[in-house]
Amino acid sequence: MAKSRLYRILSRIGVEIRPGEEVIASLLFLYFFFIMFPYYIIKPIRDAKYLIGPGSIELPRAYISAAIAVGIFVAFYSRLQVRVPRRVLIISSLVFFIVTCFLSQQLFFGDKEYTWMPLVFWIWANIFIVVLVTQFWILVNDVFNPREAKRLIGFVGGGGLLGGIFGALLTGVLGRKVPEYLLPIAFGILIISIFVVNSIFIWQRKKNPPVDKVKKKDQTKRTKPAKVGFLDSFNTIRKNKYLMLLAVVVILTVIVATFIDYQSKTVIDIYEDRIDRMLLIFGFFHAGLLVLPFFISIFMTSAIIRRLGIGLTLLLFPFVLLLCAGGIAVWPILPLAYAIKASDKSLSFSVNQFVRELLYIPISPELKYKAKVFIDMFLNRFAKLLGALILLILAFSFFNVKKPSVASNNVDILEKPGVVEKTEVSVKSEALEKPDVGKKSGGQRLTDESELPDIRKKIVRRVSVVSLFFILAWIFFNLKVSKEYTKTVKKKLEIKWDRADRMVAEKVDVDYTKLVFDTIESRDRSSVLYAMNVFDLIKKDKLTPEVKRLISHKSDEVKMSALGSLFESGEIGLLPEMDEIISEDVLEKEIGEIMSLDVYQEVMKSYMEKALKGETMESETAKMEVAKAIGLMGSESPLALKLEELLWDESPEVSKYALESAAKLKKKEYVPAIIQKLSNPITSEDASVALKRYGDTITGTLSDYLSDREENVELRKGAGSVLARIGTQDAGDFLTWELEEGKGEIDIEVIDALDRIRSENPDVQFRVATVETKIVQKIKEYCQLFVKHFSAKSKRKKAEKRKILPEDLNVLMMNIFKLFGLIYSREDIMRAYQNIRVGTKDSVDYAVELLDNTIRKEMKEIIVPLMEDLPLEERVKRCRGCLKDLTRSNKKNG
Amino acid sequence: MEINAREKDDVVIFDIEGEIRRSDISDLTLHQLVKDQLDTGKRNILLNFQNVEFIDSFGVGEVLASYISTNNLGGKLKIAKISKKLYLVFQVTMLTKVLEIFDEEDMALDSFEKE
């Protein structure tokens, strides 16, 4: 793909962008910019109008009214969003806010003053931010898969932060001189955002063309929107473990943020007694802490998420807060108050919010829309109220201090769903009015003024201790949610195929199948063999009427007859007398007794000797009969030793019967002869079946053959395959040992054998260090081959080579994943492998995301970059880089 | 037994003639031939049984081994034009539960295409 100028610019400033993503990433950046810009104009107007009007004493009324209004609005919005197409919904919302913004301008700056207006505007501003930001993040969720989002979320989110900076600066500049121009500017910017949103949907339609109309109609019929409401959204979350965890995480995040805000402001309040200095401090935070997260989000967020993964990144923020809150609990001093506030603002807006948005991406759209609206719009506000309530209770219950007023100068910089609109609960009567400190609004003294800082310190300490518990709970739920995230990603990937040997073993009784074929085949060759095969079928309780009819047809007729006539002909067999004889139990018992008679053994001995010397008519058939008969005799029979000779026989037909009998008798004397049969492709399968019957008793012997470099390679491969069929821990250990010590000539077979064991016996454990060493070796081979194959110098050759991935590379890749499957969940690894190998672009990304969250850090740093869906040149580059890194680490490790 | 390979629509078709018996195997077994194709990156294999008169248990083993090798690599192995007699045997032994069997070669090729 050709690289556009925009792509080059974004790459140069450090955005981890891929060709083709630059347009959508920039549009989303602008979309967020254009909704946060007006919000940071609206927000100061909201605060100022309210504080000048009803005043800070009335702030709780505003909080509660806003929470109730948002709750009602969520119920309405939930229903609306499943009925109205997303594009129409977003654009209509923007139009609604433009029109209402214009009306607000008229009402605020008109001739008449309306006393109810500040409260209405407060509620409106809350709905504005909740709706527009939620819509933005839902769109981001729709557009990106987790891998794309991980790379681009920092950049896209940076748009909002930049919008906030511009909005705040503009308000600062124009606010004093021409405040009446602010709202028109805000709705003017919102108008621009409509064009940006429209462009996003045009881009999306081009990328994913709509299904044809008939299909669309059908789909619409089938997916008639379910009844969606407040309760429905709540139930959706309640029934889904992952969504429940997400909801709990959001609630805890908001509560902790409320506490942090309180702690920092109270400490600042303790040490700063001048209003102008306090304004300077808050002003500094407003400006500085908006710029800091902007730079973090643009340049660091993606790198942090990539390096730490979702799990650790989720823990970063609470851990920092845990340290700061712990510090404040011990020393409620000013530097710690700055530190906690700075950590809160910078990490919350640049990392925590974005990584939490990533958690929504793998959820199915139907659930996501219901849950996200409920969590971000309603639960977020609910949690904020809950946090404020807990603070009030703490302030009342721990100290004998009568009701403090709840004052707030909301210093929040950027409000998003999931990010707290901070509530300041202060024990002093007015946040910035120092002279009234220690007094109730009515002027009643609560305590000695000189004691007040100590009381505040005590409250801060107590709040810090309580917040530590909440932070610990938050960390716990973050861990749970990140584990559940991996499971959710996994659900997006389907298993495309499983090991076929396991499937065949489950669906087909291979021994019985072969016996049926042998019986049919034997009928034309020898009535004795035929009878013995029938007897075997009887013993296996498999002589059903269909089988009886099938095997008793005359061969020529069977060959010529039609399917229907076979069942209808009523012809019953070459051995009609069998029907009368067959009382199966009696027959089995009779034959067993006959064969164990001494006289039978004696008579048979001389016949067998003749047969073995080839002195009988049709010696090959005679040997086959003898081989079969020995199998029926039992291992104690002195004739059983004759089988060894038959096992060495050159005729594959004789070998087949001999191997079958050997599998029944399982005498150790047969083992060397059976193992030799592994080297011949005609006898190897029967030999493997026979050896498998010996089980763990021969794993050591098989291992000797497996590791013997002098031995025939096919035989060694066969020994590996038998160990896989035996499938015990010992078998696994011997194979792992060969993996470690072997020279690699039978790696493919050994790895496949280990994979087979893992697939059939998940309890078998493998030595992690050995497997990881082999993985690194195979990755190295993969990179070498990749670089060699795709580094052709001429353009024509390059184009030709690009078309095909050599089979050797596919095999290497498969082996790498089989090896990973030995030490991680095989199912997860195979899911990832199959989707990387034959999946769509999105499934490749989800598969890589699954690997990223499954494999331990050191290993994933090697494999994940190689598996990502990248342009060929980039992949070659990464392979080269990987080879360099591996060589370097080899040298380092001596 | 004689096996000839040809390719059509990205499917490797093995035309098998004679009987797939243990005693009638030349240098290369059916499984070996299938593996060779898999090694070159082919993933769709069709066994044309039009001229197969009989297969013994070894033959069944070969077909199953080929099926397993193909499937383990994410490929598909199917059978076409099997005689009614053999189909009956496959049915009784439940091999039809695992192997996809088609009356005509074209139908088998279509099924590959649909996947």
Image: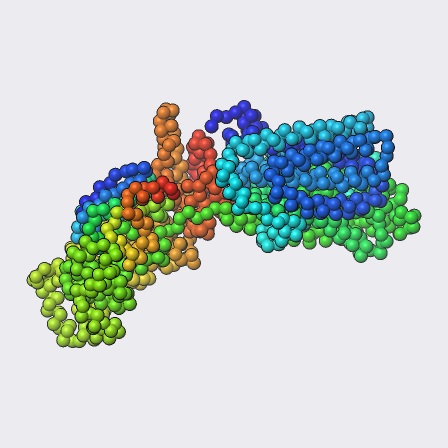
Above or below, B9 against A191 in this view is below
Residue A185, how many percent across, how many down?
73, 28
Q: In this view, does A693 lie to the left or right of A872?
A: left
Give the residue at x 80% y 56%: A398
Residue A369, how many percent across, how many down?
60, 44
Residue A368, how many percent across, how many down?
59, 45
Above or below, A412 against A645 in this view is above
Above or below, A594 against A73 in this view is below
Give the residue at x 79% y 40%: A120
Give the residue at x 82% y 36%: A49
Frontmost residue, A59 versus B56: B56
Q: How many labels does the image show?
A: 0
Frontmost residue, B104 versus A361: B104
Frontmost residue, A496 versus A524: A524
Residue A402, how many percent across, how many down?
86, 53
The quarter of the image holding the C terminus of chain A is top left
Q: In this view, does A332 lie to the left or right of A892?
A: right
Which quadrant of the view contains residue A57?
top right
Give the residue at x 81% y 38%: A118
Asked whether residue A791 is in view, the answer is yes
Colour mode of the rendering: rainbow
Asked whether residue A768 is in view, the answer is no
